[in-house]
Amino acid sequence: MAKKKSMQKKVTKKTVSKKTVKKQAKKIVKLSGKVEEPIILQPVRGMRDILPGEQPYWQQVRKVLENSAIEYGFSRIDTPVVEYENLFTRPIGEGSDVIDKELYSFKSRSRDNVALRPEFTTSIARAYIQHGMNILPKPVKLFSMGRAYRYEKPQEGNYREFRQGNFEIFGEDDPILDAQIIQMSASILKNLGIKNVQFHVNSIGTVESRKEYFKLLRSYFNSKKHKLSSRYRDLIKTNPMRIFDSKDDKCMQVCAGAPQAIDHLDKESREHFKNLLEYLDELDLPYTINPTLVRGLDYYTRTVFEIYSSDEDGKKHALGGGGRYDQLTETLGSEAVPAIGLGLGMDRLVLEMKRLKAKKYQMPRPKVFLAQLGNLAKKKSLKTFAEIEKAGILVAESFGRGSLKAQLRYASKLGVDVTLIIGQKEALEGTIIVKNMITGTQETIIKDKVIPEIKKCLKSSVKVSNK
């Protein structure tokens, strides 16, 4: 028994290494006649807890995203984390990293092939079709925020469970909407205190116009295939444009000399891109035309863009991106609907805010503190707390702490304007002691008059603080 307790203690230590945890997990422990493995007290690799100390940054990101959605006319939509697997494999494209290496797919108990969503756009497009949103006034603007999953190498800013804010616009192909969604992303970043933002933009044309372009790419990459790894040599036949998405140094050097999509656009795509750039110039948004930018997912057409911030050393930090996907709904079995979207990595936004020491969300400060002493006072305090809260006054308490002195010390630390005290005598008489923490005065009043008295004290404290 002592041996069992010793081993459990080792597993639950905060300083225990991952290697030790895994080693302990392999040991079989017999508990109550059952064979069980010890519980590993840490998240799965690539996933993490977001602790209370970090939440003000996250709350600020959520607040800015939600406010921007309202300001730009987006309606909230939430789609399931789990979808049928082929919803992603078909439009995103087999052979892409997202599908071949990063998709969390499995069979459900009913033997359906399902997957954790690796991105939001395809799920939202599915919901758009399923719920007949095509009959709504155009454009249809949808906003979502939540978790997505990709099995990739965990590193700073990259997690296997990550969070995104997504904005999708359906029903219009006018490039002014491309410009507006880029403008909105610039506004979001500014409101988060993220500066030195750069937009990389490109146009990759339509599926039809890319057919001739792909022939040129295949010819070029075949002539350089000895410089490519086997993985990228395989893409020459299936989707040569995806080679541009490589982060391998040798591959990037080969890509630098490849034919560029922007030089082989159809007439409509060329005009579309020209108009977009004119809109961005009008908005004075800093952008760079990046002819090797493709975004790596099969459903993109025409406009693609990525967003970076840079530090004092010139290092770029990716924050998000997006583009047009005018034929995604057609790939999903419906009629083609022009659309454009934006995805912002919330984990990366928080990381960048911390790096820049940007403003984080400030919790509203409670104005009133409710202190109580004795069992009867505790019972009366619960109802009093609910009544104050119902009146729209932010109130704090410290139920459970027996010492009145400790409660008053906590009230002072919170910086409240008014402290209410209910003791045994007050509970029996139906009264409350109201202490004005600004002036130091206090008086005992009837419980039914406590709300007006609190409001009176708060009003006077505002006048005092303004002097």
Image (cartoon, rainbow, N blue to C red):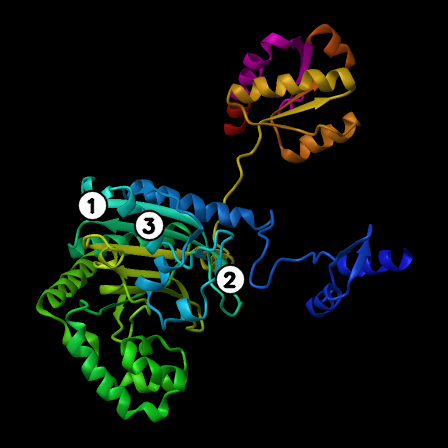
Name the residue carrying label 1: 139
- Residue 218 picture location, percent across and down: 24, 84
- Residue 409 picture location, percent across and down: 73, 32
Measure how far apart labels 1 and 2 are at the Cα level.
Answer: 33 Å
> For residue 14, what is the image quadrant?
bottom right
Q: Is residue 454 left or right of residue 190?
A: right
Residues marked 1 and 2 touching at CB (< 8 Å):
no
Position above or below: 298 against 124: below
Position above or below: 258 against 242: below
Name the residue carrying label 2: 160
Callout 1 amino acid? Pro
Which stretch appears magenta?
431-460
Name the residue carrying label 3: 124
Q: Tell me the number on the disc at residue 240.
A: none
- Residue 17 picture location, percent across and down: 71, 67
Badge 1 marks a residue whose secondary structure is loop
Q: Is residue 408 left or right of residue 385?
A: right
Badge 2 marks a residue whose secondary structure is loop
Which of the marked residues, 1 or 2, is nearer the chain's N terminus? Answer: 1
Q: Is residue 370 left or right of residue 342?
A: right
Quadrant assignment for the N terminus: bottom right
Q: Residue furthest left?
A: 267
Residues marked 2 and 3 touching at CB (< 8 Å):
no
